Image (cartoon, helix red, strand yellow):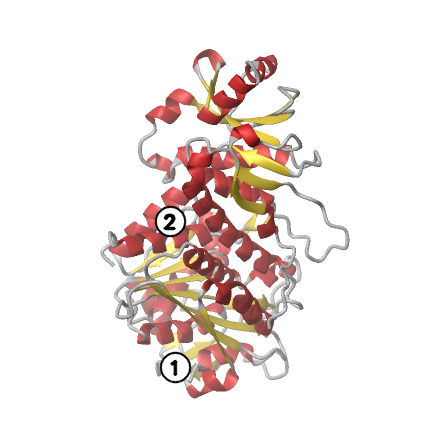
Amino acid sequence: MAMRLFQKHNLALVQTTFRALSTAAPHSGIVVGVYQGEHGAPVFTETAAAVNTSTNGNLLKLLQYGGALKGGSSRVLYGASQQYPVVSAVGLGDSTAAAEAAGAGLELRDENREAVRTAVAAGYRSLCELSLASVAIDPCGDGEAAAEGAVLATFLYQDLKSKKKDRPSVVCASDKDQKQWQRGVTLAEGQNLARALMETPANILTPTQFAQEAVTHLEKLGVEVLVRGYEWAKQRNMNAFLSVTRGSVEPPVFLELSYKGGQPQDPALALVGKGVTFDTGGISLKPPKGMEAMRADMGGAACTVGALYAIAKLGMPLNVKAYIPLCENMPGGAATKPGDVVVASNGKTVQIDNTDAEGRLILADALHYASQGKPRAIVDMATLTGAISVALGAGAAGAFSNSDALWKAMQQSGSSTGDRIWRMPLWKIYAKQVTEFGLADVHNIGKYDRQGGSCTAASFLQQFVTCDHWMHLDIAGVMENNDEVPYLSRGMSGRPTRTVAHFAHLVAEGNTGL
């Protein structure tokens, strides 16, 4: 039985029961949504209007004392009534603009849904220091987005602290929004699981322990978890993957996960996640400043597990296979040296001139293995390059794809979840830089290592893919959150877990052409 690292993890803060407004507990708080109408006048959501009626208009009176409520802000109101002693009113923005919003616009995301997530999270946080047992959340017209904002805001990684902070649980304030609310809860739980894995120190979350966490969280949902070792990988000539593992005392692990929600004959959607549980850079050692964040260099693997958690818990009607190569990249005496050449599992020789460009090496063998299963599509996630962070910052994950249909479906998913992706070029000019240079068939950094780094990395991966629908998501720029996403706390982000889970939903619906 796998050891549970996250026995008191924040998933426990989410209650899946639903309470009508009339039965709200006196010791509970409530978050209600308020739009800004003409001349700054408050315009209540359905739930807020019901609370105002229940309090004989006191909610409106208390709210008006503080003036207009701006979008994304919160205001705690006390003593509206005995039933609602603590109310956090949250701003949802201009009511006219919200009503007229159509499509994603220049921001490439549903701004109304994003406003709900941001406002609800602000409201929840405003009540966290009040020793409340629970907080009821106004669905604000979108129960899924409200649940996402609330549950993502509950996250607090404190598993290793001796003194832990109590956080109120969240419940839906409306009985009729149960289905949407529960879907949002599950999607956010998946992202919070990814965040917890990414935050865990590397001396605890070794490749072996990561595998045990996958067993713990996924097998109970009906996902088959196969844990492969060194000999299995060696027999399949995964020498690119194994070259990265040579400098570490921690044994490598290759996970193969199977969710069977579709018909047995249906081809599976394949997910591949980079699982470097700590990255020193190997012999090409990284600078010490900021190296502690490399405990999250397995962010692609964490998001893969988080997405599969949500897919399985929601019971999506499709088959999914996930492949996760796990290892450490350390500068031990047996470590791969710059200039070494290995033969990958597809028979191509690879020259390794920079051992800190290791993610593409472990993914090369994983992508070839995934391609052998003839999936309907492959999506890989990896904290692969600093170059994508320079290009896009935390605004979006970089997407490289050989398939317009896959790109359109993933872009639509990012618009819905608010966790965007941006398409980057996968042109022959970059492929030539990694295939027409050096001693071997493929070069792991390319001819011009400081030019188009994320593009040449993606082109390297493409040499190991034989699937017509493939997408590489470079998530290095979205690995951490400072203040870019207001409903996420500072720390590891778990992005783009919800976007990939939503993409799987679109594939299951059969409207993507995949």
Residue farthest to the front? 23
Which numbered marker is on residue 384?
none
Of 55 and 67, nearer the camera is 55
- In this figure, which residue is indicated by the disc labeled 1? 345
Res. 225 in view: yes
Residue that sits furthest to the left in the current view: 513
Instruction: Name the amino acid type tagged 2.
Output: Trp
Quadrant housing the C terminus: bottom left
Mark 1 neighbour class, 10 Å CA radius: few under 14, some 14 to 19, many 20 or more: many
**Which residue is pictured at 48% across the width and 52% down the height?**
495
Is residue 484 shown to the viewer in this render?
no
The picture quadrant where one finds residue 132 is top right
> Residue at left 60%, top 84%?
334
Answer few, some or many: residues within 10 Å of disc 2's Cα (few below 14, many 20 plus, some between 14 and 19). Answer: some
Kindly identify the residue that appears in the image at 48 percent across and 68 percent down.
359
Distance of label 2 from label 1 (alpha carbons): 30 Å
- Location of mark 2 (residue): 422
In the rendered view, would you say 17 is above or below 332? above
Picture coordinates of residue 267, whole percent (x, y): 28, 68
Considering the image in quadrants, where does the N terminus appear? bottom right
Near-viewer residue (410 or 116) = 116
What kind of element bears circle 2? strand
Q: Amino acid at mark 1?
A: Ser
Q: Earlier in the sequence, mark 2 or mark 1?
A: 1
363 is higher (above) or lower (below) than 102: below
Residue at 45 percent of width and 41 percent of height: 181
Q: Is residue 508 left or right of residue 243?
A: left
Tell me residue 102's x, y (percent): 31, 31
